[in-house]
């Protein structure tokens, strides 16, 4: 399956890799991660399966997944890297639960 990001013409982004060696605050690299994390198409949720129901701007319909995505973005903005890693795991877990509920 493709990621939502890929279906929208973007290259998939490896958030796990990015969080293993995160940039310093207020650097161009940090600004790039903020830019990616604040858009539904390129955030941690956007790099999940495209089968997950979303609205027209890519926001997940699932409120739990949506809230996790918002929290992930805040962690990236504030350089809270360890918390971002934990939220990423929760995003992936919730994504799996949604796909299982859909029979995928």
Image (tube, rainbow, N blue to C red):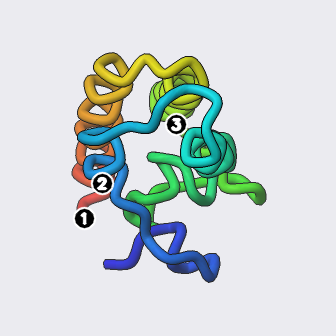
- Between marks 3 and 2, how big is the CA–CA gap? 11 Å
Q: With respect to residue 100, does 47 lie above or below? A: below
- Residue at the disc numbered 3: 62
Distance in Å between CA atoms under marks 3 and 1:
16 Å
- For label 2, the residue is 99
Q: Classify residue 53 as left or right of residue 86.
A: right
| Residue sitting at x 42%, y 63% | 13
- From the top left corner, tell me how far across and down residue 28 is, in percent: 64, 46
Dot 3, how many residues are within 10 Å of its Cα: few (below 14), some (14-19), or many (20+)?
A: some
Image position, residue 56 (x, y; %): 77, 59
In terms of sequence position, does the residue under pointer 2 or pointer 1 come before the other?
Answer: 2
Farthest residue, direction right? 56
Callout 1 secondary element: loop
- Residue at 65 percent across and 42 percent down: it is 31
User: From what the image shows, is residue 56 above or below residue 59?
Assistant: below
Quarter of the image containing the C terminus? bottom left
Residue occupying image coordinates x 34% and y 26%: 87
Dot 3: element: loop
The disc, 3 or 1, on the residue closer to the chain's N-terminal end is: 3
Quadrant location of the N terminus in the rendered image: bottom left
Q: Residues within 10 Å of mark 1 (few under 14, many from 20)?
A: few
- Residue 71's mark? none
Residue 44 position within the rendered picture, expressed as x and y whole percent measured from the top left: 45, 46
């Amino acid at each position: 399956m493709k990621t939502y990001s890929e279906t929208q013409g973007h290259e998939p982004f490896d958030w796990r890799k990015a969080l293993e060696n995160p940039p310093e605050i207020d650097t161009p690299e940090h600004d790039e991660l903020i830019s990616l994390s604040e858009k539904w198409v390129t955030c941690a949720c956007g790099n999940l399966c495209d089968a997950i129901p979303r609205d027209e701007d890519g926001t997940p319909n699932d409120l739990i997944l949506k809230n996790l995505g918002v929290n992930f973005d805040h962690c990236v903005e504030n350089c809270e890297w360890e918390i971002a890693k934990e939220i990423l795991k929760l995003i992936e877990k919730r994504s799996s639960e949604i796909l299982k509920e859909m029979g995928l």
